[in-house]
Amino acid sequence: MSEGCFDASMPRRVLEYYLSHAVTAQWICFSDTLDDDIRVILKTGIKFLGRATGIWKAEMPDEEHFARTRQAAEKIHAADPEVILQACIFETVYREDLESVKIPSWVFEAFGLEPEDRSFRWEDCTLVPGEHMPDISKTETQMWFYYRAVNYIDCGCEAFHMGQIHLYTARDRGCRAIGKVLSMMRDYAKTHARRHKILIDAHSHSLVVNGVSLLDYNAMPFTRYPVLDRPGERLVLVREGKSGGGISPEGVYEKALPFLYEYDNWGGIDRWAHEHLTYEERAWAQWWGYDQIAWFASQEEEARNAFLDYTFKWTAVNNPDGYFAFPLRRPLDSGEEVGGFPFYKLNNRSEACPGGYSQEDAAAALLREGYGKYRALANPSDLLDYGGRDIDDPETGVRLPEKVVLYGSFQPCMGAVANDSNSEITRMYYVGDGKYALAFVMPYAGKYDFGISTWGTLSACVCENGGYPYSGSGGKSPLVIPRDNTVVRVTFTYMTNEINIEML
């Protein structure tokens, strides 16, 4: 029996089989080189196609979108029935997408509502009026998520990436709404999915409520540190946070759930950074003035192969629960849209795939080799513990983060790197009652800025007292130091995002 065999249930060893053969295959269901992509899948032994379908801002009617997803899924499964295709439900909603879709009666009925003859209402989904972040606490958003999930399951998808889940759950106290939607998705899959089970991940280090993880595994992009003492645009990877533990959806307690890393995309090359910043400044501007996959694609083939090898080994050694989703297909420009942009493709360049980056042989060799011998030398998982372990909010049952970092332009005054959301030097300490605190002395008066990152990443940050979480390095709040040698203490309450600043 194959290691990838499952039906209705998936033990951790089977989940890890798929994660150890995972790639990011963004929008492969709409690929113009699908036949050659399938050839690469079979050659390399790929078993998990991350981000295979989904929308950010759709470029086609939903009927066509789902029809093409189904056709591609059938073609891939005809070549290898074991392969899992992942669909995406992201942290964005656009008026033209929602209001072009009539709500099926079964969606209303699933939520105990009388069917109506209408389309989805964009204004009834958004977190902030006029912006594109959905609010999962709203029934309209829950219906939109469920509608998409059911259609993807019917198309043959068996996994879901739920995007920046800590952002659109900002008003979902206790994660009740997202828990309800994910449970509905899993219940539908028990009857209708190909193998009666779906896997769910999101950009998260932990989403645990009352001891139970809402996710099957956690997933995040890599974090980097630029290297200036080597020629070119060099960088190294940095370990941040860890994958939290809890009772898995399989009902088994895990000290740490599996973790999946990837090269992320969000906009390709930052042309302003390349035109206006110095070499040293650009080193710190994202990934040398690129998003992650665009930086990777911009390297020479030999350097790309070396970095692929480095990433694979780095993952095995630095996170014993971690796996690397090799980049099979990823957009190099505007982010998440389906067409009209260049793609990085792992495929060897040929007439069948003229835009290939010719790295399938390097990836195939690493996938065949596996993680085993490098795991034998891995650092123990306890090195990734940051305190506050297994502490739940008493009111909601939500698991508190193990790592919270105070970051911003003030950090060099503490001997840390500026704007390092992962810094151990400015890590806040858990002080009880759901609060984290850090005290320090600022030797120089001046105007600085700050933000607070949960889990030591930029995935869910807070800078305003009681404000909504945000993603990214911008938007920090001012930190005005009135005089030299001011003593500062910052206290942060996770569940309410309350920030208190004391100065002496």
Image (spheres, helix red, strand yellow):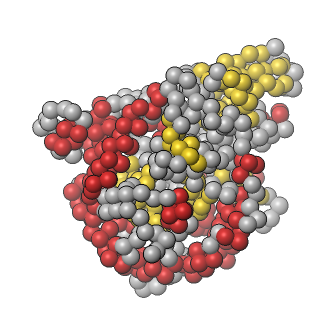
x%, y% of residue 305?
65, 74
Question: Is residue 186 left or right of 490 when viewed as pictured?
Answer: left
Nearer the observer, 139 or 194: 194
Q: Quadrant of residue 432?
A: top right
Quadrant for the N terminus in the image: bottom left
Q: Quadrant of residue 405?
A: top right
From this view, report whether residue 351 is shown above or below residue 222: below
x%, y% of residue 59?
30, 55
Q: Quadrant of residue 491?
A: top right
Pick out the residue farthest to the top.
504
From this view, report whether residue 227 is shown above or below residue 299: above
From this view, report whether residue 403 is shown above or below residue 56: above
Nearer the observer, 51 or 46: 46
x%, y% of residue 16?
54, 62
Badge count: 0
Nearer the observer, 290 or 367: 367
Residue name at image x 43 percent, y 43 percent: 91
x%, y% of residue 229?
83, 61
Residue name at image x 38 percent, y 43 percent: 182
Residue name at image x 32 percent, y 47 percent: 187
Quadrant for the C terminus in the image: top right
Does any portion of residue 307 appear in the rendered image?
no
Residue name at image x 76 percent, y 49 percent: 383
Pick out the residue farthest to the bottom.
351
Nearer the observer, 42 or 385: 385
Question: Is residue 203 left or right of 93 when viewed as pictured?
Answer: right
Question: Is residue 320 left or right of 115 when viewed as pictured?
Answer: right
From this view, report whether residue 402 is shown above or below residue 430: below
